[in-house]
Image (tube, rainbow, N blue to C red):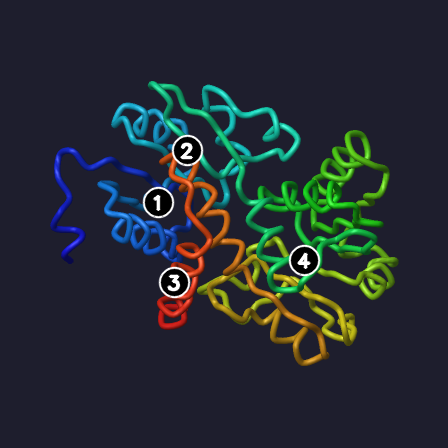
Amino acid sequence: MEYINKVSGKTKVIALIGNPIQHSISPQLHNIINQKLGVDLIYVPFKVNKSELANAVKGLKALNVLGFNITVPYKKEVMKYIDDNIRETFLLGAINTVKNIEGRFYGYNTDGEGFLRSFKEEQGHGFKGKNVLIMGAGGVARPIAVKIALEGAKKISIVNRTVTKAVEIAEVINDNIKNIATAYSFLDETFEKVFRESEIVINTTSVGMYPDVFESPLINVDYFGEGQIVYDVIYNPSKTKFLSDAENKGCKIINGFGMLFYQAIFAYEIWTGIKLNEDFIKEIFEEFLLLTSKIC
């Protein structure tokens, strides 16, 4: 409450827009950073219906916010309402961070970098020479797939209910980086074989996210193999059914907490121009991990 009581007419605002929004713990993270640094800034979440997305972006500009985050399902669609997107975002196909620079909105994507750092810190290695399976083809799948391709993966398999969306991501990789990506449907006869041959499996869908904690994007748990690395971008709950099933089959599991944390750190540095040192980042990580363990 001490921090909230310091909000004034001089306080700058950063927003979060998406739908659903009630599960997000990003406000706690950013406001902890603000409080510790003594920055006169507050981070506020807003639920936005799809039909009101354009008006929401216009409203944020009218309110002269410092910037905002975008979460599901608007990371791709919101690009059309932004004044300028940095060049890399066109390859990544989505934005999750916007900065207000002299009244113009500039779009960035910190999801891919956040994912890479969290994976490497958890696992101790990257994706060079690895066979990777990505489940889902939404706004977070493409930046992850592109970053993995740039890291030197041997093969990337993208599986999605609507296979045309998976094809789009595969073509971006094959045409712009290297011919290593293939698209699949969950119903393809070869899906099981591809899944079993993948050393790293990543769920980028929202299936299993709170409150639908008993759902999983994978029906047959026997597809998991001992020793596979299984990553779920979901952080609430901290262990989804997908991860629990994988763990029971002897897989190494990683949830989306680290990705959430590091993408937020990169976004915060974009908005404020403050370069956070590693000791401070580590301190915030431990404090936020403790906080979220009580929430998720």
Report the amino acid beneath label 4.
Ile
> In the drawing, does residue 153 fall left or right of residue 288?
right
- The answer to whether 90 is drawn above or below residue 121 in the figure is above
Residue at 67% across, 62% down: 124
Q: Secondary structure at mark 2?
A: helix
Number of the label disc, if any, that sits on residue 218: none
- The answer to whether 178 is drawn above or below residue 182 in the figure is above
Residue at 36% across, 36% down: 272
Which mark is nearer the camera, 4 or 2?
A: 4
> In the drawing, does residue 148 fall left or right of residue 43?
right
122 or 248, which lies in front? 122
Cα distance between the residues tagged 4 and 3 = 24 Å
Q: Which residue is mark 3?
A: 288
Cα distance between the residues tagged 2 and 1 = 12 Å
Report the amino acid beneath label 1.
Lys
The image quarter in which residue 245 lies = bottom right
Q: Which residue is mark 4?
A: 202
Q: Earlier in the sequence, mark 3 or mark 1?
A: 1
